[in-house]
């Protein structure tokens, strides 16, 4: 069981404007709930007890909301008010709060319609003896709000490699299992977690698990509306089959 997660919530959400003019991206609502609540509720449902949340943009507003939550994991704040450290530096700064056991690292702009339990599936694929990192990867053709060329190719044994050709079948879906010790060699400064991934790729210790569902990257206002439409239609279908 994984009991600690880090939820990446410090970004400005520039692509989300004007929705982020007065709030952080984490507090943008989708289907009546802030994005961060979608993720925290999922984590609570699988038994995660502690969620380290990094804050920067509109930090006071976000902290007030988190303190008011009555369910889910205990919230611990990693304060980046002085400087936004990006996805890699934010993890390095939070190391004293994360412990030494493997953790989940989660983006707040990932929502999905599951075919089966998604986070439980990811954890069931985790093999700490041979893996240092395990990334949840969505099929690019089963995704909403993503227009890129794909991030990774998944090999037959689960190893992942960077996109080699014009496109790759899979895109990082915003959740991974991570050994905190991997961040210790790095400085507290702004950098992408891609730098850590590159080192793990060299050691062939990074793997991918395909997301069993339809992934939605909620990165801009149009994607918010599209995700809400998909979720609304899914509810209608569920009710019609109830």
Image: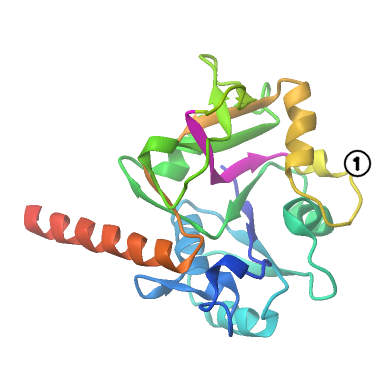
Judged from this view, the residue extending furthest toward the top is: 156
Residue 211 visible, this angle: no
Magenta segment range? 169-179
Image position of 218 (left or right of 113): right
Q: Nearer the viewer, residue 43 or 145?
A: 145
Q: Residue at x 8, y 52 (%)?
A: 241
Q: Quick one: 1 or 222, which is closer to the camera?
A: 222
The extreme front residue here reads 166
| Magenta stretch holds residue 29 | no
In the picture, residue 142 is in which quadrant?
Answer: top left
The residue under the point 79% across, 40% down is 195
Asked whether residue 87 is in view, the answer is yes
**Residue 235, image quadrant:** bottom left
Residue at the location (81% across, 40% down)?
181
- Considering the numbered disc 1 on the image, is that residue within a helix, a strand or a loop? loop
Say how many tags the image has. Answer: 1
- Does residue 57 sit above or below 219 in this rendering? below
Reply yes or no: does residue 170 show up in magenta. yes
Relative placement, left or right, of 131 versus 240 is right
Q: Which residue is mark 1?
A: 185
Residue under the point 71% across and 20% down: 204
């Amino acid at each position: 069981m994984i009991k600690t997660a880090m939820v990446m919530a410090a970004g400005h959400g520039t692509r989300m404007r004007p929705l982020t003019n007065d709030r952080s991206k984490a507090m943008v609502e989708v289907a009546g709930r802030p994005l961060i609540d979608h993720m925290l509720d999922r984590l609570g449902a699988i038994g995660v007890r502690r969620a380290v949340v990094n804050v920067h943009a509109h930090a006071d507003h976000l902290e007030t909301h988190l303190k008011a939550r009555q369910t889910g994991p205990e919230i611990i704040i990693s304060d980046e008010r002085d400087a936004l450290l990006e996805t890699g530096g934010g993890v390095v700064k939070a190391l004293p709060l994360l412990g030494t056991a493997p953790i989940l690292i989660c983006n707040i702009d990932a929502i999905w319609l599951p075919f089966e339990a998604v986070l439980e599936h990811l954890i069931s694929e985790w093999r700490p003896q041979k893996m240092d990192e395990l990334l949840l990867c969505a099929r690019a053709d089963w995704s909403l709000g993503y227009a890129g060329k794909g991030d990774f190719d998944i090999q037959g044994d689960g190893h992942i490699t960077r996109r080699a050709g014009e496109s790759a079948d899979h895109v990082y879906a915003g959740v991974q299992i991570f050994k905190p010790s991997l961040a210790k060699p790095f400085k507290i400064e702004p950098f992408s977690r891609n730098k850590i991934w590159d080192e793990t790729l060299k050691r062939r210790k990074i793997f991918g698990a395909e997301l069993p569902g339809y992934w939605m990257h909620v990165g801009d206002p149009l994607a918010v509306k599209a995700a809400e439409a998909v979720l609304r239609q899914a509810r209608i279908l569920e009710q019609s089959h109830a």
